[in-house]
Image (cartoon, helix red, strand yellow):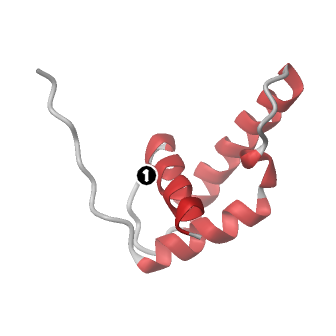
């Protein structure tokens, strides 16, 4: 059985950064499934990950899956 790698929880600074990035890239919340929407969404997610890595105050490297999960959790909490 493959072991799961577990990163530290997101800090408050990381959560605030993700909230700001979510506002900067509204395409990540697009519900469309046509080719244009999917390409925009993929491009926006790549930009969010890059912006998060470069702007992360804690220096933790997060992958796309972790960032998507945190943003989805943030959206359902609000």
For residue 60, above or below residue 36:
below
- Residue at 50 percent across and 68 percent down: it is 56
> What is the quadrant of the C terminus in the image?
bottom right
Q: Position of residue 4 (x, y in %)?
A: 20, 37
Viewer-side residue, 34 vs 60: 34
Residue sitting farthest toward the left:
1
Q: Residue 21: image x %, image y %?
A: 68, 63
Depth check: 62 or 38 in front? 38
Secondary structure at numbered mark 1: loop
Instruction: Answer above or below: position of 68 versus 73.
Output: above
Q: Residues within 10 Å of mark 1 (few under 14, many from 20)?
A: some
Q: Is residue 76 above or below residue 27?
A: below
Q: Residue at x 50, y 71 (%)?
A: 15
State the image coordinates of residue 68 (x, y, percent, origin top left).
53, 47
77 displayed left or right of 2: right
Q: Which residue lies at the image location 79% right of the left edge and 25% below the top edge?
A: 33
Q: Which residue is mark 1?
A: 62
The quarter in which the N terminus is drawn is top left
List x then y, in percent, for residue 61. 41, 54
Question: In the picture provided, is 35 more to the left or to the right than 1?
Answer: right
Left or right of residue 26, residue 3 in this image = left
Q: How many marks?
A: 1
Residue for point 73% across, 48% down: 29
């Amino acid at each position: 059985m493959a072991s799961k790698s577990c990163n530290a929880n997101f800090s408050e600074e990381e959560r605030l950064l993700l909230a700001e990035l979510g506002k900067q890239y509204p395409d990540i919340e697009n519900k469309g499934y046509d080719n244009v929407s999917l390409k925009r969404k993929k491009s926006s997610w790549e930009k969010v990950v890059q912006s998060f890595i470069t702007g992360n105050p804690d220096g933790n490297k997060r992958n796309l899956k972790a960032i998507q999960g945190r943003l989805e959790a943030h959206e359902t909490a609000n």
